[in-house]
Image: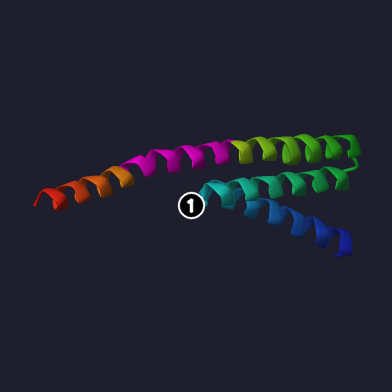
Amino acid sequence: MNLVMIFDALLIFSMLTLGWMSIFSVSLFRCIVFFVCLGLLAAIAWGQLGAFDVAIAEAAIGAGITGALLLAAWNQIRSHRTKAIEPNVTNAKTSQKDTREHV
């Protein structure tokens, strides 16, 4: 086995591992990070195959733009979750204060 075959085997194993981790990870942020890393490894794989134009497109679109859009969507989801949770917490605290004051 030469060095190129070892690199290709490591690349395939890494891509399969990152694909599995991006699907089955519990944290949504980790899923996004694993997906972006998978896109970068796919770009390297396309470069290994000699399709450099596809590799550049994969790196730009697959990892760059898609990763940025997924992170923006994650940020929106996170901000909406905190806004939905905060009023319930403040209402519970104020209702406890009101009952203590009346007693």
Give left or right: position of 31 versus 100.
right
- Observer-nearest of 30 and 72: 72
**Residue 86 drawn in magenta:** yes
Q: Amino acid at mark 1?
A: Val
In the rendered view, tell whether residue 3 sits above or below residue 49.
below
- Observer-nearest of 89 and 21: 89
Residue drawn at 80 percent across, 41 percent down: 59
Label 1 Cα neighbours within 10 Å, binned few <14 / some 14-19 / many ≥20: few
The residue identified by callout 1 is: 26
Q: Position of residue 11 (x, y in %)?
A: 76, 55
Q: Which residues are magenta?
A: 73-88
Q: Position of residue 81 (x, y in %)?
A: 44, 41
Residue drawn at 72 percent across, 44 percent down: 39
Q: Position of residue 85 (x, y in %)?
A: 37, 43
In the rendered view, tell whether residue 65 sits above or below residue 15.
above
Quarter of the N terminus within the rendering: bottom right
Residue drawn at 84 percent across, 40 percent down: 55
- Quadrant of residue 42 within the rendered picture: top right
- Observer-nearest of 41 and 90: 90
Examine the residues drawn in magenta and state their main secondary structure.
helix
Give left or right: position of 1 versus 62.
right
Give left or right: position of 59 versus 35.
right
**Which element carries disc 1, helix, strand or loop?**
loop
